[in-house]
Image (cartoon, rainbow, N blue to C red):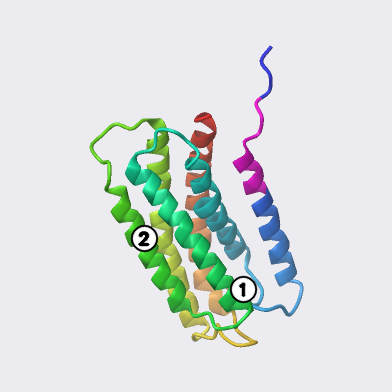
Amino acid sequence: MKAPRKVPVWVLVAGAVTAAVFAFARKQNRGERIGGAMSLPKVLWLNYTLVSWFVIPAALLRRQGLSPGTRAALTAHLLSFTARGGAELWLLYRTRSWKVAYGVGHDALDLALVSALMRRGRGRRWGRADAVARQHLDAIRGTLLFEMVFASLFHRAVAGKTQGEDGIFFASDEPRFRRINALTAAVDVAAYARLMTVARDLVRLR
């Protein structure tokens, strides 16, 4: 009789991240908190970005058989967004000086960096792990493009009001965010479907 497989650590981390995101959103939506309330599509999107842009790349980097370009792209993306996360949290909650342009600029930079690094090592057969990682990097690049669109629409909806004590950080269920929420909900469906496929393939790589 086969022993049951252990749950991969990255799955547990992803679960913890999801629980933390929904706990955070619940607090945001209970009253007047810094940044404002969050709509469900935006809660799901935040969770997706944290799992897809941080947890999955870190898990993929632990796999053998990655091409130099794939490994470099995953590493650069993780380092880039880890640095961005620290800076963004400081500017949002400490100095209250975050601007949408900062995020859009970083998204574009990360997109260009990942795309450039992925060109390395093409033309060779690297195996299943590399294929799964490259598929996920393609998903990251696609969702970065949508993130830039979301940010631009959000900037317009709040008239750039993201700074100061009454700055708005999140799209709520207010009518002015209806277009953003509808687009985000549509992207959520496609993004989570792709994420589930990558998660399945990653489990099978063990």
State the residue at coordinates (41%, 66%): 107
Q: Residue at x 49, y 76 (%)?
A: 154
Helix, strand, or loop for circle 1? loop
Q: Nearer the viewer, residue 96 or 159?
A: 96
Location of mark 1 (residue)? 172
- The range drawn in magenta is 5-15
Q: CA distance from mark 1 to mark 2?
A: 27 Å
The N terminus: image quadrant: top right
Depth-wise, is mark 1 or mark 2 nearer the camera? 2
Query: Quick one: label 1 or label 2, which is nearer the N terminus?
Result: 2
11 magenta-colored: yes
Q: What is the three-letter code of the residue carrying label 1?
A: Ser
Q: Determine the residue located farthest toward the right in the rendered image.
A: 30
Q: Main secondary structure of the magenta part?
A: helix
User: Would you place residue 139 above or below residue 86 in this image?
Assistant: above
Q: Nearer the viewer, residue 104 or 62?
A: 62
